[in-house]
Amino acid sequence: MDMFTWARPKPLEITHRISADQRIYIVSDLHLGDGTRSDIFLGKDRELMRFLEQVREEGAHLVIAGDAVDFHQAFSMSRVLKAHARLMGELCSLAESNGVTYLWGNHDYDISLFKDLLRFEVCSSLLIGDEVLVQHGYQYDPHIGPNLDQTHVHTMGHHMVERVLKTWIRLPIENFYTRANRMAFWTFHKWANLVDLADRMWTALGQPEAMRGLQTMVYYWTQNQIGDAGMLYDGVSRGLPLLPYQVLITGHSHLPGVVALPTGQRYVNTGSWTFSSAQYALWDHGALCVRDWLTGREYTDGAYRHLAEGRAAHMNFREWWRENYLGWLRFRGGEEGRIAPVDPAEGEPSLGRGAAPA
């Protein structure tokens, strides 16, 4: 099995259930790639293997909530296996001893790797007891969720650009404050102005819906930049109250935290293992927390507070630009924070979070 089967039909919706009366580790978005500079896992194989050893020793169950392998970045399975051979072996061994449940994500177009090669239990949704639902999270992303098939092409294109330029083109800009990314933001600003101008022209001609799709894309970009990666919190806050569960656990946005909704339900995001992050959620017989494996830091609702309070929902792209662009490709977050550039040739980012490409 070398090249990924991009044309394989979308897998069926499958829900599994496991007992809540146990210790369960939940990780997501490992994004294992081909070991090159564009592999955003950044070679943390030893750290992840130590994590897997703790899961084994505790007799715990492991849940991987999607996007373990970055199919779009790696291009061929042989390159992933060569770059992460020992880690793949440890994952397979853990599946045999403790059991591993895998939920496919938006980067998991070919799931035969997890089902047939690594011997994981594979599903689209997992219930822990009766009150906890685990999903990858793309289902609540207003861009990727309804357009899963189309976004595969966009994601491959994004990875190709990063590979050619040998740098990151990602949100938020303060985490990826490189010359190439600043130029990309400046270019996006000009394009967004053209979209706004065209929207006003079409509205004057009696066609106010003509540019709705592009305006929605600009708003999606803006919300990602100001903290709602993938607009996942917006989608979850709308969708979770309609579900008969007390807790929803996802990955996808790479933004770890535990958030209480006004309904009394809780939203938990596992974070990711990309760049300098190594985050996981732990369910321990009903107790729930999110931590970083490398630093021990515990995450609560800090990254979500401004979203929960609605402090950023009103902001459009023009307002964000006026508040943050300082001229000459300088942006307030990067300049005032003096965040070191995140470049494959210059080492790891100073901050561990970065939004996943579509």
Image (tube, rainbow, N blue to C red):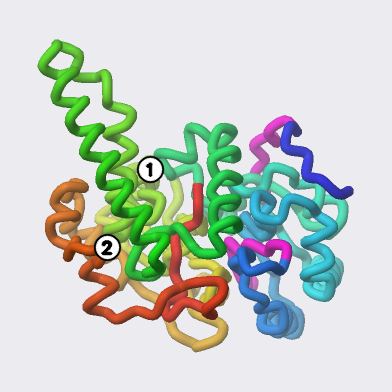
Q: Where is residue 270 in the image (x, y as percent from the top left)?
A: 50, 66
The answer to whether residue 100 is visible is: yes
The single residue placed furthest to the left in the displayed view is 204
**Picture residue at 56% right of the left edge, 82% below the top:** 293
Q: Position of residue 282 (x, y in %)?
A: 55, 74
* Mark 2 or 1, closer to the camera: 2
Q: What element carries label 2?
A: loop
What is the number of the mark on residue 239? Answer: 1
Q: Is residue 31 magenta?
A: yes
- The foreground one among 239 and 109 is 109
**Picture residue at 78% right of the left edge, 70% below the top:** 84
What whole-number distance in Å separates the C-alpha atoms at marks 2 and 1? 38 Å
**Amino acid marked by disc 2:** Leu
Q: Earlier in the sequence, mark 2 or mark 1?
A: 1
What is the number of the mark on residue 329? Answer: 2
Q: Where 156 sits versus 21, above or below?
A: above
Q: Where is residue 144 in the image (x, y as percent from the top left)?
A: 48, 40
- The foreground one among 333 and 126 is 333
Q: Where 50 sits versus 121, above or below?
A: below
The answer to whether residue 283 is visible is: no
Q: Where is residue 177 in the image (x, y as percent from the top left)?
A: 37, 69
How many marks can you see? 2
* Residue 285 in the figure: left or right of residue 349: right
- The foreground one among 76 and 105 is 76
Magenta stretch: helix, strand or loop mostly: loop
* Residue 97 in the figure: left or right of residue 337: right
- The foreground one among 159 and 352 is 159
Residue range highlighted in magenta: 9-34
**Picture residue at 57% right of the left edge, 70% below the top:** 273
**Amino acid marked by disc 1:** Gly
Q: What element carries label 1?
A: helix
What is the number of the mark on residue 113? Answer: none
